[in-house]
Amino acid sequence: MTDRIILAFESSADETSVAIIKNGNEILSLEIATQIKSHQRFGGIVPEVASRHHIEQITLLVEAALSDAQLTYDDLTAVAVTYGPGLVGALLIGITAAKTIAWAHNLPLVPVVHMAGHISAAQFVEPIQYPALALMVSGGHTEFVLMNSENDYVVVGDTRDDAVGESYDKVGRTMGLSYPAGKTIDQMAHQGESTYQLPRALMNDGKLDFSFSGLKSAVINLKHNADQRSETLDLTNLATSFQSAVLEILLTKTRLALEKYPVKMFIVAGGVAANQGLRDGLDQLSAEFEQIKLVKVPLELAGDNAAMIGAAGDIAYRHGKRAGWDLNAKPGLDF
Ligand code: KG4
Ligand code: ZN
């Protein structure tokens, strides 16, 4: 059997990334150019700035990826690219690069949904066993995704308002932390105590949906009121209180999801899957579900990267998923 070698692109937000993946689970090369510094002073991603950085980086990253893997275009089997969701201008840079290479070298073009990419990063730990359930937690998403079989993604729980990563970033901004604040809050949370009372929404509804906007607003109001009274908040304890609430919500809903869907494998994926409190909490929870294998995507592959797009691209490629030259960015794409 000949190897499948996929050149993969990810440019949906503020990371430009190109990877070469062998047979869906081996990273031959992975290049990531982060733009975080350019966006930090604005407190979030500026779409125009993101597109410009993607354009500057993408060709260089393709050259670096081929050179690191010691391959040429002739060795490639297919080209995979994130086509949504994300920022339209940012997505278009990756799509255009992928199309150009696929067309010039007569290679199939495989469209990949960003969240399928995040979940497929589990393949770098071990082969996904189906049925599988994923908790997909990032800056843009907070959802449970059921996969009864390969290449079949069904959202069975979703946030009704903010994504969990977005809440981390907004709470971080209120606390005066730089963007993105998830990692910093996570680190602070381990040093304080949960002294502030914060709300946890939808905890007893028996459903798999989430709501984080009330929690986020509670922190913002707390800070606002303290500022008005010229009081200072203990930010370390605030971080601990916020993260305790987030973890209680995520872990309660995960327990419910695993009771409802007794799958073979449970995957935690997305940027927030790097959260140490969440990883530890899931380790403990998984002891209650002995028959369900817990897979936490590797820390270095939790955030946006093209290796995960190559892994999902390999699955989609084997299932015959192809895009035409008219492939367009889909900013609001669901699976
Ligand atoms: O998956 P990702 O890189 O981009 C999106 O697809 O959104 O996720 C980025 C999000 C940001 O909101 C960031 O604050 C959050 O992941 N994040 C974390 C941690 N590391 C990154 N949130 C909580 N704890 C962390 N350790
Ligand atoms: Zn992402």
Image (cartoon, rainbow, N blue to C red):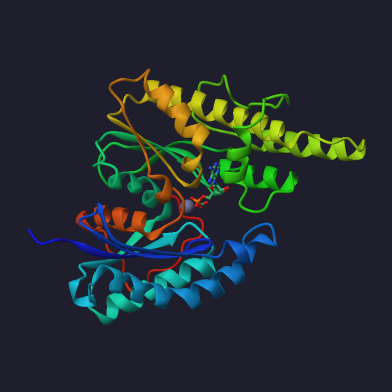
Q: Residue at x 70, y 35 (%)?
A: 236
Vertical relation: 49 (above or below) 40 = below
Q: Residue at x 84, y 36 (%)?
A: 232
Determine the residue located farthest toward the right in the rendered image.
229
Q: Quadrant of residue 68?
A: bottom left
Q: Residue at x 24, y 54 (%)?
A: 24
- Quarter containing the N terminus: bottom left
Determine the residue located farthest toward the front in the rendered image.
191
Residue 69 is left or right of residue 91, and the answer is: left
Q: Position of residue 211 (x, y in %)?
A: 60, 34
Q: Position of residue 275 (x, y in %)?
A: 51, 39
Residue 311 is left or right of residue 195, and the answer is: left
**In-front residue for pair 322/10:** 10
**In-front residue for pair 319/27:** 27
Vertical relation: 159 (above or below) 245 = below
Determine the residue located farthest toward the bottom in the rendered image.
104
Q: Position of residue 329 (x, y in %)?
A: 46, 66
Residue 74 visible, this orientation: yes
Q: Quadrant of residue 160?
A: top right
Q: Number of callouts in the render?
A: 0
Residue 132 is left or right of residue 84, and the answer is: left
Residue 46 visible, this orientation: no
Q: Position of residue 179 (x, y in %)?
A: 64, 53
**In-front residue for pair 186/131:** 186
